[in-house]
Image (cartoon, rainbow, N blue to C red):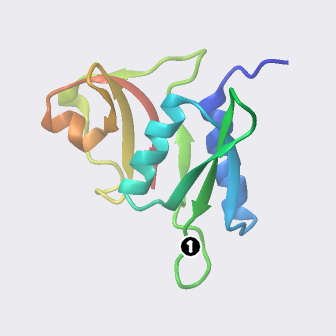
Amino acid sequence: MSMSDPIGDMLTRIRNAGRAKHETCLVPGSKIKKSILDLMKEEGFIKDYESVKVNETFEDYKVFLKYDHTKRPIIRELVRVSTPGRRVYIKSAEIRPYKNNIGTLIVSTSKGIMTGKNARKLKLGGEVILKMS
């Protein structure tokens, strides 16, 4: 059976692994997921990720989760905003700081996938993929 929302599946895998206190989790690979993981690493929500070859054509990403000193996950909230059944678009002027700049929006723009902060600086709107804090 095909998956209707691969990005939502990735977020659920990361969220569940964090709640179960796992050090890593495995997510199926794609270009958009790689871009999202790059931004999550850049913003400090995950330690790192590495590519794991499944076979010659497919690869997965092994995501190394990050925890604070009390062993609570750094990712407190990881929510898919725009879904395949309900697309959510935002203009650059409508992009506001999320959770008083503690959280981050991930936006798909014409210049690629970026944080809401960068999209606002570049005056680019787009599809809001997810929000995390």
44 or 82: which is nearer to us? 44
Give residue 91's position: percent from left, percent from top: 24, 23
Q: Is residue 81 visible?
A: no
Residue at point 58%, 68% (across, down): 73
Q: Residue furthest right?
A: 1
Quadrant containing the N terminus in the rendered view: top right
Q: Amino acid at mark 1?
A: Tyr
Eyeballing the image, is 19 above or below 54? Answer: below
Where residue 32 appears, x then y in whole percent? Answer: 49, 30
Give the quadrant of residue 28: top right
Left or right: where 99 falls relative to 60: left
Provide residue 87's location: percent of width, then percent of height: 49, 17
Residue positioned most to the front: 56
Asked whether residue 64 appears in the rendered view, the answer is yes
Above or below 132: residue 55:
above
The residue shown at (44%, 21%) is 88
Q: Nearer the viewer, residue 97 or 55?
A: 55
Helix or strand or loop: what does disc 1 sit on?
loop
Q: Is residue 1 above or below residue 74?
A: above
Q: Quadrant of the C terminus?
A: bottom left
Q: How many marks?
A: 1
The answer to which image quadrant residue 100 occupies is: bottom left
Q: Which residue is identified by label 1?
A: 67
Question: What residue is drawn where x is 63% and y is 34%?
Answer: 8
Camera-nearest residue between 93 and 112: 112
Q: Residue at x 67, y 61 (%)?
A: 24
Q: Is residue 130 left or right of residue 98?
A: right
Rendered location of residue 69, percent (x, y): 53, 84
In front: 120, or 61?
A: 61
Q: Residues within 10 Å of mark 1 (few under 14, many from 20)?
A: some
